Image: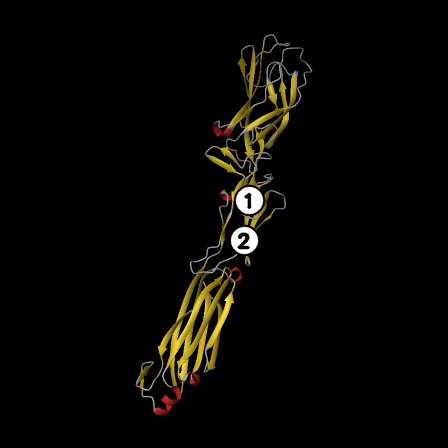
Amino acid sequence: MSGRLIRLPGPALVTLVGAAFLLPLSSWAQCGSADLLAVHRLWRIGFNEVEVLAGTQVLGDYWQNWDTSVQSTERINGEFLHSGSDSTQGNRSAVQWNDAPSSAGTGTYTTSNVHLASCAGFSSTNVSSDSLVVLSPEIDNLPYNSALWYFGPGTPGAVPVAGGYAYQYADLAFNKNCGVDDTCTGTVSWSEIDPLGQISVSSNGYLKSMGGGSSCTYESAVQAGLNGWTLTYPIFVNSPNSLIHPKAEETLPLGAGYQTRKYWAVVDACLMSVPSVALHEVFGTFGNPGVVSGWPDPAATGASGYNYTNYIFFDTIGANGASYDPSTTYTSSTPPYAYNTRLKYAAQKWYIGSQTAASGRQVFNGTIEYFRDHGNSR
């Protein structure tokens, strides 16, 4: 509590508001010697409570003969918020109110007060003011651009990408933004707005992606509540979404056979290229409708990451063997090819984010095919 003492008229010559007064005995006997106490305080008594107090009180032997009054006005960021006044005789006059910044607003709170004491035609006036900055609380440690990645089930918390990590989690923190003299207690309550089941938030603010990433929009939100404050931050869950062909295929000679390269790029929910992450493929059972002998099944590809130009990788579909029946051959580097009878094929799936079979984010579900002079994946 702050206050200011001002000496009020006594039995001697006293100067008030620039004029000289000689108090007669009757006035002295009625008012006596006294002090004006101007009380004023603007402070934060709780995380979501700002209190204003202004008062006027006379101290001395004849305090009960003095009239007191106080007038107070409160503003926030220069805009009027409250005003009040009080007056009494022989007691303290005071005004007081409390504001919740979550509804009243944050910024700079100011008060201006006028304190007045009078007795038998004598009076004294004092002005006071206070200022208090109240900042909005914030959620800290949000992921970059408030976006999480989702790489499918069975993937680790952070997946290496070119130049950094694609995080699937964030350890959030609640910053109350209180001043050193503020009283700001309480425990935050974490929750989420999650209509599509894309995120989860634990009681200690551990945010994790759980799915989604099918559209390039902020479809979820994380919330933090404390003592009347509710903070809502949109969250975008991004994900590798599909494979595209960034450049045309090409077939190269390979011994007594060929090597077809199918070029792929991984794109996310925003149709942007995904930097290098782990990838692998899974084959189904191979069918051999036109092969008599000598065409072995290929081995599935897996890699900790790819980092070709413009984040392109290629799938090699090749066969090399003069003893194969029918034998392999090279006829052309690009379509159309000479042979179009499918000799060997199987279901083919590509997964991104993990090298473990059938885990991670599936981005392709198609068929791998072998012909006598080229391969294909579609």
How far apart are the alpha carbons under marks 2 and 1? Answer: 14 Å
Q: Where 106 falls versus 9 (above or below)? A: above
Q: Nearer the viewer, residue 48 or 131?
A: 48
Q: Give, as a three-letter code, the residue at label 2.
A: Val
Q: Which residue bears the numbered disc 1?
A: 207
Q: Nearer the viewer's eye, disc 2 or disc 1? A: 2
Q: Position of residue 31 (x, y in %)?
A: 39, 86
Which comes sooner in the sequence, label 2 or label 1? Answer: 2
Q: Position of residue 136 (x, y in %)?
A: 48, 56
Q: Position of residue 105 (x, y in %)?
A: 50, 61
Residue 378 in sight from this viewpoint: no
Which residue is situated farthest in the front direction here?
A: 61
- Label 2 element class: loop
Label 2 packing within 10 angstroms: few (<14), some (14-19), many (20+): many
Q: Which residue bears the numbered disc 2?
A: 188
Q: Position of residue 137 (x, y in %)?
A: 49, 54
Q: Where 262 falls versus 206 (above or below)? A: above
Q: Where 270 falls versus 21 (above or below)? A: above
**Residue at 65% across, 10% down:** 293
Label 1 packing within 10 angstroms: few (<14), some (14-19), many (20+): many
Q: Where 346 falls versus 328 (above or below)? A: below
Q: Give, as a three-letter code, the residue at label 1.
A: Leu
- Label 1 element class: strand
Residue 108 in sight from this viewpoint: yes
In this picture the colour scheme is secondary structure
